[in-house]
């Protein structure tokens, strides 16, 4: 923890590492308490381990100020009911004011109590500086918000209070909320996607939040129930302007007296009892409410969730939705259909590797001008329906749109860049689930983000970015399948960073004014990002470097949080990467050393085509 080890006396926590049972993995139904093994006291924020359980230990009689501070910091990392043991280190007045559920401050490592400062005559007691490196904050909506890493310095104050055992040291002033090192945060919390509907559309948008891995200390709810509760509370503030919930405002769970969790039945169905606010909704609305729950909890259950049944406050059925019915609300309505993979071959023609192809030599050129050699293609974006594509050609100066399923005429370019040199011209294009085409012009004299409604059915429109890029220039554009979010690689002062923006549409639904707003960092731990692709509803795959590190290919969450085991097998000189919205599909990348390569689940990178560039999935 960085503190003097002499502070770790009888105060503190106990961490129990459960031996892996149940065929070597932790499965639903395995006991969390071990039958054998030693119990030992350890420092907070060792390497994250999902097998470790932390049991808080109350302060001993006559505990020293050092023991009180260290014991409290470690007790915050436990699952103790309502943090009762952590509160035992506080004065009654401080305990009443402390709200650990209100926010969580995440430090790079466990907070380090500095050298104590004795109190003054007008403020007796002891003050301890709490030191660390601040990397993120989780707010009351459970939203993870990365920050530019900075020094953390707050103060915790102790005084002596009279009690049954005489005067005892207790904390009477402390920072708000929880204070955790990164590894303790990762052990205690997990990322889960809540789902809401894109404004004006019947497709769902992921809203990532962090909930407790096991029971929530305050509500005693398990992860499934926590997720449903968070869903009913509404979208996070960042996503709220572009999504809608189908639940009536104020709808809440109505659990039976004494119950704290929802349960699955023997058919892998989940009954969700709601209060009076939802009792009179119509069937169409109810089905959409059920779809939101289905998408939200489908990845939280160890077994496949087969159906969601919503209940009125009196216990009668509102509606039932099956897993198959919910898929109709997926962003691109293509769940279950594997995507083809596309790339530019050695003759600068657009080629595809049919879904499931595993051997080199199988790619075939697409129909039309992009595949028959009429146009020398630089890079490409394939529409999500795989009927047409957008190709950048002429050393990245011109953008064309054409069919890739039938022969067609090569029309005029829909966008032309006047930038000097390929690096100052057009980016690779990207399609959203609405059928709109996006591309950026990197011309320093006329930089712009452009959208072509319905893929060149109308003139390109320049998209305003609010509050602006502050001198940065767009290097790459990737729009989410739901069309509500956009990933941008931005270059400024020689450094390229990744940011996520919200895509807002205002005015006439047939001809909206589109803006990108409130850009936020998505890979703050990376000093430079060179390539990015969406890899699921709220996950990205990025190629980049951490400060002082080597190039990595890794998964990250769109909120900037890390993905467990997110660093992928090494690959040299990666220039581009592509992933499907279907997370079961393999990654594809272009390496200057190895050509077009693929990463199947549980395997290493495999070369598919030695000569080729610019791999993409539809989107």
Image (cartoon, helix red, strand yellow):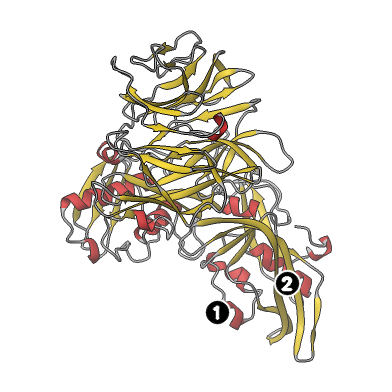
- Residue 615 located left or right of residue 592: left
Find residue 41 and report its horizontal and vertical position in percent: 73, 56
Instruction: Provide the secondary structure element on which disc 2 rests.
Output: helix
Q: Residue furthest top?
A: 361
Find residue 86 and report its horizontal and vertical position in percent: 62, 69
| Pick the front one: 605 or 24 | 605
User: Quarter holding the N terminus?
Assistant: bottom right
Please tell me whether residue 167 is drawn above or below residue 280 in the rendered image. Answer: below
- Residue 46 located left or right of residue 381: right
Question: Measuring 38% from the left and 42% from the top, which residue is drawn there?
Answer: 298
Find residue 586 and report its horizontal and vertical position in percent: 48, 26
Q: Is residue 29 visible?
A: no
Please tell me whether residue 494 is drawn above or below residue 55 in the rendered image. Answer: above
> Image quarter for residue 153?
bottom right
Q: Is residue 590 visible?
A: yes
Q: Are marks 1 and 2 in contact (CB under 8 Å)?
A: no
Instruction: Provide the secondary structure element on which disc 1 rests.
Output: helix
| Pick the front one: 360 or 529 | 529
The count of marks equals 2
Q: CA distance from mark 1 to mark 2?
A: 18 Å
On the image, numbered disc 2 is attached to which residue?
A: 68
Dot placed on the residue nearer the N-terminal end, 1 or 2: 2
Which of the numbered marks, if any, corresponds to residue 170? none
Please tell me whether residue 153 is drawn above or below residue 122 in the rendered image. Answer: above
Find residue 149 and report its horizontal and vertical position in percent: 66, 56
| Pick the front one: 279 or 397 | 397
Q: Residue furthest bottom?
A: 122
- Residue 598 located left or right of residue 196: right
> Image quarter for residue 109?
bottom right
On the image, numbered disc 1 is attached to which residue?
A: 96
Is disc 2 surrounded by few (<14), some (14 to 19) or many (20+) residues within 10 Å? many
């Amino acid at each position: 923890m960085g503190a003097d080890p002499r502070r770790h006396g009888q105060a503190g926590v106990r961490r129990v590492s459960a031996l892996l049972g149940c065929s070597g993995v932790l499965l639903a139904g395995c006991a969390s308490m071990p039958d054998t093994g030693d119990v030992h006291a350890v420092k907070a924020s060792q390497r994250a381990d999902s097998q470790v359980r932390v049991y808080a230990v109350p302060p001993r009689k006559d505990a020293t100020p050092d023991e009180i501070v260290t014991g409290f910091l470690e007790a915050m990392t436990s699952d103790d009911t309502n943090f009762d043991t952590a509160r035992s280190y506080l004065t009654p007045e401080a305990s009443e004011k402390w709200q650990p559920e209100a926010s969580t401050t995440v430090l790079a490592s466990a907070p380090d109590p500095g050298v104590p400062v004795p109190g003054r005559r007008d403020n007796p007691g002891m003050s301890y500086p709490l030191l660390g490196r601040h990397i993120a904050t989780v707010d009351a909506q459970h939203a993870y918000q990365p920050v530019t890493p900075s020094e953390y310095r707050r103060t915790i104050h102790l005084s002596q209070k009279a009690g049954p055992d005489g005067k005892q040291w207790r904390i009477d002033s402390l920072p708000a909320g929880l204070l955790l090192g990164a590894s303790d945060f990762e052990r205690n919390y997990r990322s889960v996607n809540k789902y809401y509907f894109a404004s004006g559309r019947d497709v769902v948008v992921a809203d990532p939040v962090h909930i407790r891995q096991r029971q929530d200390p305050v509500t005693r709810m398990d992860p499934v129930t926590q997720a449903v509760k968070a869903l009913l509370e509404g979208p996070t503030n960042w996503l709220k302007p572009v999504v809608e919930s189908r639940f009536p405002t104020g709808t809440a769970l109505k659990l039976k007296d004494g119950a704290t969790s929802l349960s699955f039945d023997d058919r892998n169905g989940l009954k969700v009892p709601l209060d009076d606010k939802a009792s009179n909704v119509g069937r169409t609305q109810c089905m959409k409410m059920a779809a939101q729950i289905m998408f939200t909890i489908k990845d939280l259950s160890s077994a496949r969730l087969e159906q969601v049944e919503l209940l009125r406050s009196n216990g009668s059925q509102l509606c039932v939705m099956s897993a198959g019915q919910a898929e109709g609300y997926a962003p691109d309505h293509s769940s279950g259909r594997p995507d083809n993979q596309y790339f530019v071959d050695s003759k600068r023609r657009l080629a595809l590797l049919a879904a499931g192809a595993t051997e080199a030599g199988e790619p075939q050129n697409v129909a039309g001008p992009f595949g028959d050699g009429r146009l020398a293609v630089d890079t490409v974006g394939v529409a999500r329906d795989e009927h047409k594509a957008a190709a950048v050609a002429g050393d990245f100066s011109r953008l064309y749109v054409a069919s890739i399923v039938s022969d067609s005429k090569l029309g005029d370019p829909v966008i032309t860049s006047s930038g000097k040199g390929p690096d100052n011209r057009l980016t690779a294009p990207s399609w959203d689930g609405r059928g709109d085409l996006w591309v950026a012009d990197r011309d320093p004299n006329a930089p712009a983000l452009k959208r072509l409604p319905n893929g060149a059915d109308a003139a390109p429109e320049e998209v305003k970015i609010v509050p602006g890029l502050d001198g940065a220039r767009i290097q790459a554009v990737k729009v989410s399948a739901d069309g509500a979010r956009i990933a941008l690689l931005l270059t400024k002062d020689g450094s390229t960073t990744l940011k996520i923006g919200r895509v807002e549409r205002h005015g006439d639904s047939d001809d909206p004014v589109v803006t990108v707003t409130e850009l936020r960092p998505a890979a703050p731990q990376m000093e430079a990002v060179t390539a990015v692709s969406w890899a699921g509803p709220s996950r990205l795959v990025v190629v980049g470097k951490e400060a002082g590190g080597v190039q990595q290919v890794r998964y990250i969450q769109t909120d900037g949080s890390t993905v467990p085991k997110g660093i992928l097998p090494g690959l040299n000189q990666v220039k581009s990467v592509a992933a499907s919205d279907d997370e079961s599909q393999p990654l594809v990348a272009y390496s200057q050393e190895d050509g077009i390569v693929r990463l199947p689940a549980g395997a290493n990178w495999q070369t598919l085509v030695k000569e080729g560039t610019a791999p993409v999935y539809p989107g």
